[in-house]
Amino acid sequence: MRYLIYDTALNGFPTLMGLQKYYEVNESLFKGTKDEVIMDVSPWLLQIDDQLSENLSKETDFSMQFTLQVEAVGDIHRVATHLRKWIYQTIDGREYFFRFYDARVLRKYLPTCDEDQLIEFFGPVDRFIVGGDAENEVIQFWQENGVLKKQHMIV
């Protein structure tokens, strides 16, 4: 399955509402957490199809900065449950948000992971697909037996 992770805090609630018009299968990554009520800034997982680019081209006021796509095994609830466990991280007794759902953060984080961390972080996720530095560039990340792989592509 293909999913889009949309960061409402970066891109706004109106765009989320528009995306939900096209993609009715979606779930907040804050669902079931202490932050479930702050929907206007929560990250969302939306099950997408091959029409994403076409649908986005119809919308002139959508903001899609630093979103990422995910290819994963399993339904949206399985994938969301897996991703949700990474949002809150405790370091030295203090709780922090780990904003892996911001493509800029994910691009920097994945290369720092060791074998066990990669296997655990990816879980049911086959690939993370993020925007690159150049226009129309995407970077695909995947792991094979705990070794991070990446491929730069122009689309």
Image (cartoon, rainbow, N blue to C red):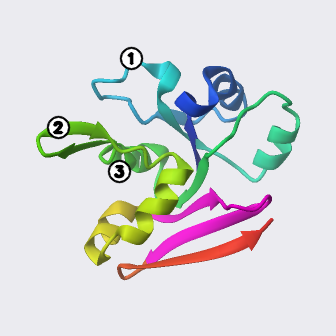
Please, what is the three-letter code of the amino acid marked with disc 1? Val
In this rendering, is residue 154 above or below 149?
A: above
Q: Secondary structure at mark 3?
A: helix
Which of disc 3 and disc 2 is earlier in sequence?
3
Q: Residue at x 69, y 63 (%)?
A: 138
The answer to whether 124 is drawn above or below residue 85 in the figure is below
Q: Earlier in the sequence, mark 2 or mark 1?
A: 1
- Examine the structure image and report whether residue 46 is included in the region drawn in magenta: no
Q: Give the magenta part as a residue range.
A: 125-143
Instruction: Answer left or right for 23 relative to 110.
Output: right
Which of the numbered marks, if any, corresponds to residue 82? 3
Q: Which residue is mark 2?
A: 94
Residue 149 x %, y % = 51, 79
Specify few, some or many for label 1: CA neighbours under 10 Å numbering under 14, 14-19, or 20 or more: few
Q: Is residue 136 above or below residue 91?
A: below
Residue 125 visible, this angle: yes
Residue 73: image location, x then y, percent: 48, 61
Quadrant of the rendered image containing residue 58: top right
Q: Where does label 1 land, which residue?
A: 37
Closer mark to the observer between disc 2 and disc 1: 2
In whole angstroms, how far apart are the C-alphas of marks 2 and 1?
22 Å
Separation of residues labelled 1 and 3 (CA atoms): 20 Å
- Tell which tag, 2 or 3, sits nearer the viewer: 2
Q: Is residue 134 magenta?
A: yes
- How packed mark 3 is, by other alpha carbons closer than 10 Å (few <14, some 14-19, many 20 or more), is some
- Tell me if residue 2 can be seen: no
Tag nearer the camera, 1 or 3? 1
Question: What residue is drawn where x is 79% and y is 58%?
Answer: 135
